[in-house]
Amino acid sequence: GNTFCGKFGVVVVGVGRAGSVRMRDLRNPHPSSAFLNLIGFVSRRELGSIDGVQQISLEDALSSQEVEVAYICSESSSHEDYIRQFLNAGKHVLVEYPMTLSLAAAQELWELAEQKGKVLHEEHVELLMEEFAFLKKEVVGKDLLKGSLLFTAGPLEEERFGFPAFSGISRLTWLVSLFGELSLVSATLEERKEDQYMKMTVCLETEKKSPLSWIEEKGPGLKRNRYLSFHFKSGSLENVPNVGVNKNIFLKDQNIFVQKLLGQFSEKELAAEKKRILHCLGLAEEIQKYCCSRK
């Protein structure tokens, strides 16, 4: 029935950086963790146990009645397959972004989740950051003339994390969440594989035709950093002041997921979020096709 008592059994798939944070949050006494019970983790590596949490096989995780929820924290290239398997097995799924590396796969998996009556949640901790809360307040009611967002970081393997428009989809999500749906004007990708260097430059525009440029630049010696500049009719915003440390953003994301498990979001809210997620994945795919057609 619908009366819920006890906890949802959880398995964490992939125990890299995100998976480790998820396991820590699940084992600490947080309000949302009270609804969740960490049963084990799945990894391609033979690890046995981590901090007293047992490794279990993928087969056992899928077939166990005890496991009701899967957190997919593996490399992006494997997300689609894991999501499909866990939804087909009747489990709720939380997945780190990007949920898939194509729009069609994402649409198919949302349909599968709806058909199975399960929650499918794509993590977006970037929307839970202090900087984003600051920006959201800053842009309210302002007319954008033009803007740019540059993200720099160390090298990232495309084979594992997807094309830069997908691995960097959290930056795109910021822009869409701030300025509404965007359309692609053009995009270029400059790569020097031997130097592990790449730079993707994307020209987007808002529904009111204001230009936005989004650049992802990765290479050795580049520090993780965001540079932004937004020009409005009423002045401009250059970079975000120091707005404090991001506390527990993965935990805040878990809180949102638990609210979904407990049916605390309206259909309208869920539909708007799904629309945004699919819009961003669709744009990422368009950018990839645009860059690849010009190689």
Image (cartoon, rainbow, N blue to C red):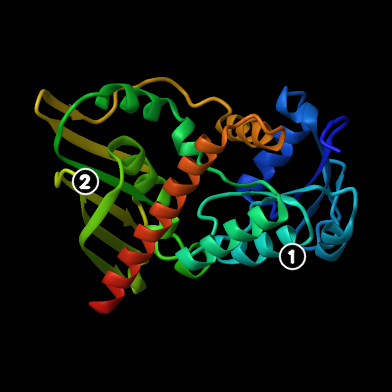
Residue at left offset 82%, top offset 35%:
2
Q: Is residue 26 left or right of residue 248?
A: right
Q: Earlier in the sequence, mark 2 or mark 1?
A: 1
Residue at left offset 53%, top offset 61%:
106
Q: Is residue 172 left or right of residue 56?
A: left
Q: Quadrant of the C terminus?
A: bottom left
Q: Is residue 112 above or below residue 246?
A: below
* Nearer the observer, 135 or 115: 115
Locate residue 182, reporting x and y percent.
27, 50
Q: Quadrant of the N terminus?
A: top right
**Which quadrant holds residue 75?**
bottom right
Residue at left offset 21%, top offset 46%:
207
Q: Is residue 264 above or below residue 190?
A: above
Q: Nearer the viewer, mark 2 or mark 1?
A: 2
- The residue labelled by disc 2 is 206
- The residue labelled by disc 1 is 44
Residue 102 visible in the current orientation: no
SS at mark 2 in the image? strand
Amino acid at pointer 2:
Thr
Locate residue 51, reporting x and y percent.
82, 41
Q: Is residue 30 left or right of residue 153?
A: right
Q: Is residue 150 above or below residue 83?
A: above
**Residues at discs 2 and 1 in contact (Cβ within 8 Å):** no
* Nearer the observer, 70 or 54: 70
* Nearer the observer, 38 or 92: 92
Give the class, few, some or many, for how many residues have Cα within 10 Å of label 2's Cα (few <14, many ≥20). Answer: some
